[in-house]
Structure formats: structure tokens, C-alpha cells
Amino acid sequence: MSLTPGDRIVELLGQWSDGPVPDVVVEPDAEMLARAVAAALVARLAAAQAVHGTASVVLTGGGVGTAVLRHVAGLAEEPAPGQDVDWTAVDVWWGDERFVPADDDERNEKGAREALLDRVGVPPQRVHAMPASDAGFAEPEEAAEWYAGTLADAARDAGAEGPLPRLDVLLLGMGPEGHVASIFPHSPAASDDRPVVAVRDCPKPPPTRVSLGFSAIGSAEEVWLLVAGEGKADAVASALGGADPLDVPAAGACGRRATRWLLDAAAASRLPGAGG
Ligand SMILES: O=C(O)[C@H](O)[C@@H](O)[C@H](O)[C@H](O)COP(=O)(O)O
């Protein structure tokens, strides 16, 4: 990845931040961003497998997130030396999902299967989709509770402490008002402690969803925020400037070991030192 603009921004952020400083990397445009993130993701998953034997990734919907998956599928066809991911040993989770029927084009799961999962052959038992509205749960609250139970079962099977398994990389898109997963500004999900929450009356359609909460997002080893476009520039600057997560939920999305803001130049254009 090109690091020059990102390094400059990290240096500036270090002057204002009290907590762990996020990494900020800026690529020239959305396409180059998606390619760079795909390469970084493959390297990170391969490294996790070298240490643990398995890897886990939490997927996002959205244009950049889905483009990343397409590029990952391309890389899987011609893996670089030492960066060969064994897709039979990758657990796939989701950060949020629309509570609509399984075959609805709005499903993040559907997009991810088409872009990557069906192409690399992740075993069905490792694809942990959030329930669709026709999967036997009448209400999204039941679906959220079931997903929390699935996470807890995986944690227990792996001998982890607590209700969440090791999540190596958690990918998030961000909306122009700063929402991440389906945690929207000032919504109940933004102040809910549960790992998985039902979301109703979502300001962006479809209105009914299931989302990881901040407690699950913050349990991930690394959180990667994938953001492209000028329309996101204000929210990026607010989140990195220390906004209240109730106002700008992306500000509350931090990984245990690393938080990486992976931006295109337009999304980074209002950061200090970016010249925007
Ligand atoms: O309905 C949603 O909530 C969106 O799908 C959302 O979560 C998406 O990931 C971001 O808005 C970023 O999307 P883009 O990458 O397309 O800008």
C-alpha cells in the first residue's frame, strides 16, 4: 500500500489523540483502495493461519467491501508466495445483515457469496451468515440472539474466554453520516452492550436488520474501516477527530490491537494535512 499520505496523517493524529492512534492509509481512488485492501487482507489471514491454523474475518456489505472480496477471489487464483490462504480454514462472520429473505439482492451474504465465498470454497459450516427473515425467526431480536449464541458456541469450541471467538480482521464500511455495521447515529444500537442487536426503523432501507454491537466490534483483533468518496470526508474527519460514537458511530469502532482507516484520497480530503 502507498503509505506516504497516511504516514503524514498518522503523525498529525498522534498530536491530538489520547488513546491508541489508528493507522490511516490513503490510496488514490476507490479501485486502488479495494486492490490494496484485498492484498493486505490475504496477507493478514495467511499470517493468522500460520500462527493459529485458522483465520477469521468479519465481512461488510457496501461497494468497497464487496469490491475487496472480488479482488481477494482474484488473488486466490494466483496466490503470492507465502500468502496462500487455506479457505477451508477460514471462519466467515458478518458485521451486519438485512433482515430480508435469503434470496433478496439486499442481503450482504448474497453479495459476499457471489464475490468470494462461492469462488474459493469456504466450507458451509465455516460460513456464519446472520439469519434471513425466512430462516425461521419471526423477529430480528430472535435472530440477533441466535447469532450471539452462534458466536458464543464458536468461542467455547475454540477454548476462548468470554462470549466471542477470535476475530482476526473485522471489515466495516461507513455511511456518509458515520454509521458502521447497522449502528446509526443516536440509534438504540449505539448504546446497546449486547454483542448482537436487532435494528428496527433503520434510517437507510431496508429498515429491519441485525448488527454486531460495539462490544463485539471492539473484540476484534483488527478493525479495518474501508471508506471511499468525497461524501464520506466529513464523517471521516469527525470520527478521527474524536467525535462521540453516539453522533458518529465510526468513532467507536476500534480493534483490540489495531484500527486501520483505509481511505481513498477523496474520503481523506478533510483530514488535517490532507490539503482538503
Ligand atoms: O445499508 C447499509 O448500511 C450499507 O450497505 C452500509 O453499511 C455500507 O457498508 C456503507 O454505507 C458503505 O457503503 P459503500 O462502500 O458502498 O460506500
Image (cartoon, helix red, strand yellow):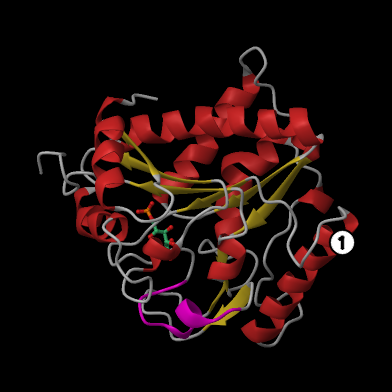
Figure check: 243 above or below 227: below
At x 10%, y 39%, the residue is: 275
Residue 154 lies in quadrant: bottom right
Which amino acid type is marked by label 1?
A: Arg
Asked if one can make out residue 27 in the rendered structure from this viewpoint, the answer is no
Q: Residue 23 in the image: x percent, y percent?
A: 40, 40
Other-residue count near label 1 (Cα within 10 Å), few / some / many at <14 / 14–19 / ≥20: some
Q: Nearer the viewer, residue 224 or 142?
A: 224
Determine whether, in the image, residue 205 is placed left or right of residue 16: right
Circle 1 residue: 156
Q: Residue furthest left?
A: 275
Quadrant occupied by the N terminus: top left
Residue 39, percent from left and from top? 52, 27
Q: Is residue 164 above or below residue 37?
A: below
Stretch of the chain drawn in magenta:
183-193
Residue 78 vertical placement versus 271 (above, below)? above
Q: Residue at x 33, y 71 (%)?
A: 244
Who's the residue at 73% across and 58% down the image? 128
Q: Is residue 4 part of the magenta span, yes or no?
A: no
